[in-house]
Image (cartoon, rainbow, N blue to C red):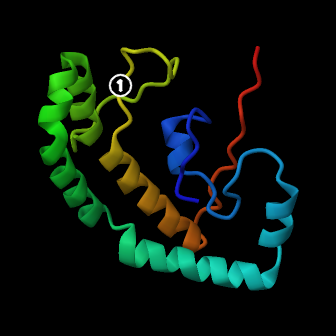
Amino acid sequence: AWGNFPFVGTAETRERASLFHPWVGEHRLLERVTATEEFQKIYRARLEEMLTKFFLPDRLNRRIDEVAAAIRSAVAAESELRLSRFDQAVSGKVLPRWEGDPFDPTRTAHQLKRFIQARAKNAREQLDGHSKGLLLERQQPQ
């Protein structure tokens, strides 16, 4: 529900993925379970709890900074490329989004803080009924 869809959609679509359809493709069990009123009530309450108590951008960003400071020297020992990508990933500076080949080694790193901020905002919009979120789909091979 919080956007763990690697290589599905773009960074922007994953930030806006539906909280109420948190899977890709067809999934009959999840479709049936999430359609029940009892589940919806419990699920919505848990999403609300997560968003107000745990999925807090400032809190998560501080933790990212703490962990990044603790492991940066180990990453630096690997290579300059890995350090550069690590610094991009943990930076609060907004970098241009990469929408090309996800396996391209020169792509911009996925920015954790940017994702958290955008995901929290969109999750709030969905819980408040201002957005339905996006249904993610796997790309078909061409």
Q: Which residue is mark 1?
A: 108
Q: Residue at x 21, y 39 (%)?
A: 93
Indicate the quadrant containing the N terminus: top left, top right, bottom left or bottom right. bottom right
Q: Which quadrant of the view contains residue 60?
A: bottom left
The percent position of residue 79, horizontal first and vertical second, equals: 21, 18
Q: Quadrant of the C terminus?
A: top right
- Identify whether 73 is placed above or below 38: above
Residue 47 in picture, x, y percent from top left = 54, 74
Kindly state the secondary structure of the residue where label 1 is placed.
loop
**Few, some or many residues within 10 Å of mark 1 (<14, 14–19, 20+):** some
Q: Classify residue 8 as left or right of residue 107.
A: right
Residue 37 coordinates in the image, percent (x, y):
79, 83
Count the marks.
1
In this view, 110 is above or below 80? below
Give whichever of 18, 75 is nearer the camera.
Answer: 75
Q: Is residue 133 left or right of residue 88?
A: right
Q: Nearer the viewer, residue 131 or 42?
A: 42
Q: Is 30 in front, or is 12? A: 30
Q: Residue at x 39, y 20 (%)?
A: 107
Q: Residue at x 20, y 26 (%)?
A: 83
Amino acid type, callout 1: Thr
Percent coordinates x, y for residue 17 in the rendering: 60, 51
Left or right: 37 in relation to 95: right
